[in-house]
Image (cartoon, rainbow, N blue to C red):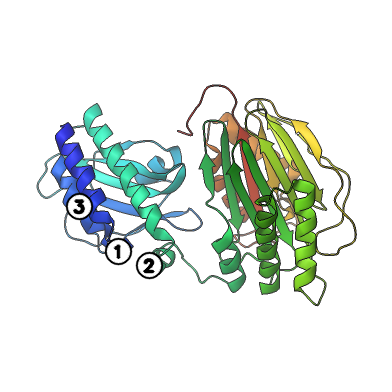
């Protein structure tokens, strides 16, 4: 058994080095069969995390091309939503050579970033078979993650609409939407996915410090995207030179002012979170204050002295504000497009509804990424699936004590 696993995983790894994204279905099929995992099917999620889209060239057991499936309401979608292995007793209808086919669906996880799902047909649902399938899904995700940034095929596959130039600018710069260690979980989401203008987020871990930032630039055009791109680049450049949050915000202020003849600006929050102690240090430049949710309750805003947006060169940032988190606290950074979304009756989505949604999903035991996926779809539905302003949320959960995985 171990020998079969080693042959499957080792062979796939060896053959993947010179393979391209389009080669993956055939490559996985060839090696999965060595360990008794038949007819593997690979789906990736679309940009808005509504659909699971099959990689090109794959077919079902009858030779029919695969079709996209909804994440909500499907068995494969349940594996994606819940980060769990799900068994289906139907392998897309009656199987031509198995009287009672069983298929396992598994999430494809790059660390904690959900890329899609893998489906495999099995002989028997045993712990050893599940472990073999889990290892295969893990390796597939790692291989795919290494090829996505170099594949326009993947970009085209994950998009269901044309993307604006401004969105292309900011999305290409922002980090992946999910990251986790034993001490910290980060989740982020931005809408409208294909036409976002001035919103952007950033985060990075340096030793025991998690750097986070969120920006909302003036306007909804390409210039807004350029402003946010400069803000993110200046933020990274400053902190990688050892700058503290106040100096980072001032360097962003200067960088935006230098680049435009006409006045341009961005509001934003620049923060450091010590993942060992839970101490938050932050600067707020005219942005909505972050929220703290603790034990299913909204406990406070992270208020700070008022300051002008970045880009005007009007004033220096004040000394950073500080707040001590407790284990399990969630810090929520957001742009005003989330709470300002209005429905046909001109009713705002509002801060109360926003906070209540996050708390209810926390009570349900959902992961931070799944909470944000559902949140942004709810905001979109509230405004008839079309936002008038960008809506971005960056959620950080601080987990102290024994190391725990997102799963």
Residue labelled with disc 1: 22
- In this image, 313 relative to 145: left or right? right
Q: Which residue does the image show at 64% across and 38% down from the upper left? A: 209
Q: Which residue does the image show at 24% across and 39% down from the upper left? A: 89
Q: Which residue does the image show at 15% across and 48% down from the upper left? A: 95
Q: Which mark is residue 153?
A: 2
Instruction: Tell whether label 1 touches label 2 (CB within 8 Å).
Output: yes
The answer to whether residue 193 shows anywhere in this view is no
Q: Secondary structure at mark 3?
A: helix
First of labels 3, 1 by sequence position: 1
The answer to whether residue 137 shows anywhere in this view is yes
- In which quadrant will I find the C terminus? top left
Whether residue 372 is situated above or below residue 159 in the rendered picture: above
| Crowd around label 3: few <14 · some 14–19 · many ≥20 (10 Å) | some
Nearest the viewer among 137 and 161 is 137
Residue at the extreme left: 97
Whether residue 58 is situated above or below residue 165 in the rendered picture: above
The answer to which image quadrant residue 252 occupies is: bottom right
Residue labelled with disc 3: 29
| Crowd around label 2: few <14 · some 14–19 · many ≥20 (10 Å) | few
Q: Secondary structure at mark 2?
A: helix
Q: CA distance from mark 2 to mark 1?
A: 8 Å
């Amino acid at each position: 058994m171990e020998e079969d696993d080693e042959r499957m995983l080792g062979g796939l790894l060896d053959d993947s080095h010179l393979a391209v994204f389009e080669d993956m279905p055939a490559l996985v099929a060839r090696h999965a069969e060595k360990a008794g995992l038949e007819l593997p099917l690979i789906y990736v999620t679309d940009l808005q995390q509504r659909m699971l889209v099959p990689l090109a060239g794959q077919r079902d057991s009858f030779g029919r091309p695969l079709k996209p499936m909804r994440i909500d309401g499907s068995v494969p979608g349940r594996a994606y939503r819940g980060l769990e292995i799900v068994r289906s007793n139907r392998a897309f209808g009656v199987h031509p050579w198995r009287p009672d086919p069983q298929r396992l669906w598994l999430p494809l996880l790059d660390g904690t970033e959900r890329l899609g799902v893998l489906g495999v047909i099995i002989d028997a649902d045993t712990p050893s078979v599940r472990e073999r399938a889990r290892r295969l899904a893990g390796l597939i995700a790692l291989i795919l993650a290494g090829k996505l940034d170099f594949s326009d095929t993947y970009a085209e596959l994950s998009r269901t609409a044309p993307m604006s130039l401004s969105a292309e600018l900011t999305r290409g710069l922002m980090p992946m939407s999910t990251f986790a260690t034993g001490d910290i979980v980060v989740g982020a989401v931005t809408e409208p996915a294909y036409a976002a203008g001035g919103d952007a987020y950033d985060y990075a871990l340096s030793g025991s410090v998690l750097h986070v930032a969120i920006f909302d630039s003036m306007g909804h055009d390409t210039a807004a995207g350029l402003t946010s791109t400069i803000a993110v680049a200046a933020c990274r450049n400053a902190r990688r030179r050892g700058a503290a949050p106040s100096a980072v915000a001032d360097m962003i202020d200067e960088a935006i002012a230098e680049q435009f003849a006409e006045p341009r600006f961005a509001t934003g929050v620049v923060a450091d979170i010590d993942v060992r102690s839970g101490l938050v240090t932050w600067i707020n430049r005219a942005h909505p204050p972050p929220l703290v949710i603790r034990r299913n309750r909204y406990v406070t805003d992270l208020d700070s002295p008022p300051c002008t947006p970045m880009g005007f060169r009007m004033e220096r940032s004040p000394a950073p504000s500080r707040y001590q988190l407790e284990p399990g606290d969630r810090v929520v950074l957001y742009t005003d497009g989330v709470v300002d979304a209005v429905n046909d009756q001109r009713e705002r989505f509002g801060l109360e509804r926003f906070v209540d949604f996050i708390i209810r999903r926390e009570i349900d035991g959902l992961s931070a990424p799944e909470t944000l996926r559902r949140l942004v779809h709810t905001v979109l539905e509230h405004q008839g699936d079309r936002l008038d302003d960008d809506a971005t949320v960056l959620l950080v959960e601080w987990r102290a004590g024994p190391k725990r995985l997102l799963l």
